[in-house]
């Protein structure tokens, strides 16, 4: 019985932690990681501040846990669906299309979580900066690696500069996110998609492998954000 009771407390603690982090990633995507506090989250979720403190211990640990939770959501929505495809232009195109959909559907209410917090922490130092910079750097590395794999598959020209192409693709994605969040303009996602397809055709060994647009494209997002909450 004692073990069953202990297991139940652990499960409740895990559920409480997940609820806190789900709220935290939403707040941070709009107000930044500095907008988080143990007291605020306790009040908004009707929890005791001491209970929240027991789960995280400090504001910095809460911020780090929030970044880790956001990474899990990002992987679920952007990275994992592309992993199921064979290496090549299809995987690269899917990765970019997933990113546009993730931003346009407001998986995080403030648009791309990492675009928001990167601007907040780019000139700072410390563990939170390192976690944010690491996540952002890993995304660039993944895009570049996906381009290299498409080269090995013979679908991207061997002479293409993978680092330069990755930079340009990410720039188009992030500009669409920035314009949409700042101006509430969702047509920028179609512009970014057109730019990405055009750029990929320029490096493709067989441009006919590319359709006219990205898939899965942002159809739901172009009609407006998806307000559903996503578990972390």
Image (cartoon, rainbow, N blue to C red):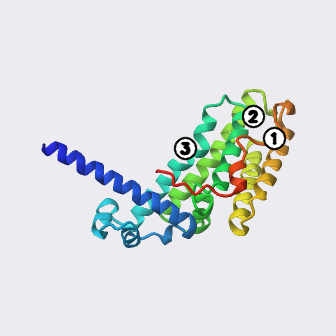
Rendering quarter of residue 95 = top right
Image quadrant holding the N terminus, namely top left
Q: CA distance from mark 1 to mark 2?
A: 8 Å
Image coords of residue 60 (percent x, y): 41, 65
Report whether 230 appears left or right of 189. Answer: left
- Say which residue appears at 86% left-offset and 33% top-offset: 207
Q: Which residue is mark 2?
A: 89
Image coords of residue 225 (percent x, y): 64, 57
- Which residue is nearer to you in this view: 222 or 83? 222
Element type at marker 2?
helix
> For the residues carrying marks 1 and 3, which lies nearer the camera in this image?
3
- Say which residue appears at 50% left-offset and 56% top-offset: 131
Q: Residue furthest front?
A: 223
Can residue 165 be seen by looking at this rendering? Answer: yes
Q: CA distance from mark 1 to mark 3?
A: 24 Å
Report the disc number at residue 76. 3
Element type at marker 1?
helix
Element type at marker 3?
helix
Q: Which residue is mark 1?
A: 200
> Does label 3 or label 2 sit earlier along the sequence?
3
Rendering quarter of residue 84 = top right
Report whether 51 appears left or right of 209. Answer: left
């Amino acid at each position: 019985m004692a073990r069953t009771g202990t297991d139940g407390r652990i499960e409740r603690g895990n559920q409480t932690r997940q609820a806190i982090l789900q709220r935290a990633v939403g707040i941070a995507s709009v107000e930044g990681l500095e907008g988080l506090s143990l007291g605020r989250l306790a009040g908004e979720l009707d929890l005791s501040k001491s209970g929240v403190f027991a789960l995280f211990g400090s504001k910095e640990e809460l911020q780090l846990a929030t970044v880790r939770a956001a990474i899990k959501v990002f992987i679920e929505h952007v990275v994992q669906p592309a992993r199921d495809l064979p290496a090549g232009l299809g995987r690269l195109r899917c990765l970019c299309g997933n990113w546009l959909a993730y931003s346009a559907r407001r998986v995080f209410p403030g648009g791309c979580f990492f675009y928001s917090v990167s601007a907040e922490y780019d000139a700072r130092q410390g563990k939170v900066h390192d976690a944010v910079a690491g996540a952002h750097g890993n995304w660039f590395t993944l895009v570049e690696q996906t381009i290299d794999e498409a080269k090995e598959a013979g679908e991207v020209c061997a002479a293409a500069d993978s680092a330069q192409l990755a930079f340009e693709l990410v720039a188009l994605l992030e500009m669409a996110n920035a314009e949409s969040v700042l101006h509430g303009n969702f047509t920028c996602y179609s512009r970014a998609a057109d730019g990405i397809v055009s750029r990929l055709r320029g490096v493709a060994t067989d441009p006919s492998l590319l359709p006219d647009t990205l898939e899965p494209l942002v159809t739901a997002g172009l009609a407006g954000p998806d307000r559903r909450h996503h578990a972390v």
